[in-house]
Image (cartoon, coloured by chain):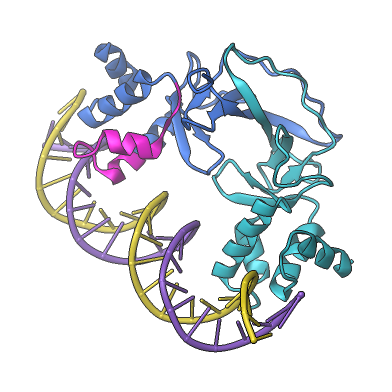
Chain colours: A blue, B cyan, C yellow, D purple
Amino acid sequence: MEKQFAGLLSQHELKVTSARLLVLQIISAANSAVSQPKIETQVNGKVDRVTLYRILSAFEQKGILHKVIDLNGTANYALCSSKCTSHTHHDEHLHFNCTNCLKVYCMNDFSLPPVQLPNGFTAGSFNLSITGLCKECNG
Amino acid sequence: MEKQFAGLLSQHELKVTSARLLVLQIISAANSAVSQPKIETQVNGKVDRVTLYRILSAFEQKGILHKVIDLNGTANYALCSSKCTSHTHHDEHLHFNCTNCLKVYCMNDFSLPPVQLPNGFTAGSFNLSITGLCKECNG
DNA sequence: TTAAGTGCAAAATCTTTGCAAATGT
DNA sequence: ACATTTGCAAAGATTTTGCACTTAA
């Protein structure tokens, strides 16, 4: 399990450090995207806040993580699925924001029905955020 | 034209002040959602930065403006269409972020094809952000 | 008149930058 | 050994709060 993360890092020409492994572990352990404040809390004492900023932005640039801005403007991060190089464009993302527990779920399995844009507009990526109650909060 | 804004304010139990009218004018003059920094620039010298924060959040709460967080996490504001009271839920928003000029277009005329959620998830609002090039930047 | 709205100063956050020490290869 | 990465300090930026003054109703 940890070997995989180490491999992931070296694949992207990033050195394998404990800070980076920890961040990967935290994010991969969640079944949803994790907010930066939450990651911050979880690495508290182990990784400096500034280092976390740098790690997250490095991961995003390398295509290891997705950055999702939620409806409050807070950054959330999730592991990229399989083939997400820095040059993959024209992608779709579907996220579900639970208004109760504030989790962000990545629904990569769902694909978006086609949307027709007005003339002259060219689409790069689609990003659908759905707000509501998630499975766990819907009791 | 200005009478309409005054009416809009009193309808929502907000006092008609020059600061509020100015903000409404700026936002309604744009054909797209306006970022808070841009509004800030335009009211510079006339409305205090702090007052702007308060005006915008009051407008959002009353349902006069939509707040749209763009892909950089910056707040953008647009006038709500016709019937947007503070209690209207289950709404859809469709926004287009131009990667070149950074404008955010509200495409209220387009409606979103239905998306099926996994069991147990209940949707409140849908928010689709499309990134790409807008009509003007697509030359 | 008087409750709501505004501006200023200042606190609390959040994010970025620079540099010396530590770490991975 | 050497280039990266990290932590700390500090600068910048953004957002919030408190309070006295002003303004709309």
Left or right: A37, with B83 as reference point = left
Left or right relative to C16: residue A125: right
Q: How many marks are shown on the rendered structure?
A: 0
Q: Which residues are magenta?
A: A32-53
Q: Nearer the viewer, residue C25 or A116?
A: A116
Q: Residue at x 24, y 31 (%)?
A: A19
Residue A30 quadrant: top left
Q: Residue at x 39, y 37 (%)?
A: A36
User: In the rendered image of this protein, does residue B111 appear above or below residue D23?
Assistant: above
| Image-based side of A6 in relation to D20, left or right | left
The image quadrant of residue B139 is top right
x, y (%) of residue A22? 26, 26
The residue at the point 58 percent across, 73 percent down is B48
Q: Nearer the viewer, residue A108 or A37?
A: A37
Q: Quadrant of residue B2?
A: bottom right
Q: Is residue B128 magenta?
A: no
Q: Residue at x 85, y 34 (%)?
A: A118
Q: Work out whether A78 lies above or below A75.
A: above
Q: Is residue B92 visible?
A: yes
Give coordinates of residue B118: x percent, y percent.
59, 12
Residue A126 appears anywhere in the view: no
Point out the image quarter for the N terminus of chain A: top left
State the image coordinates of residue A105 (x, y, percent, origin top left).
Answer: 51, 23
Residue A50 in magenta stretch: yes
Q: Residue B32, percent across and down?
A: 76, 50
Q: Compared to B33, does B3 lie above or below? A: below
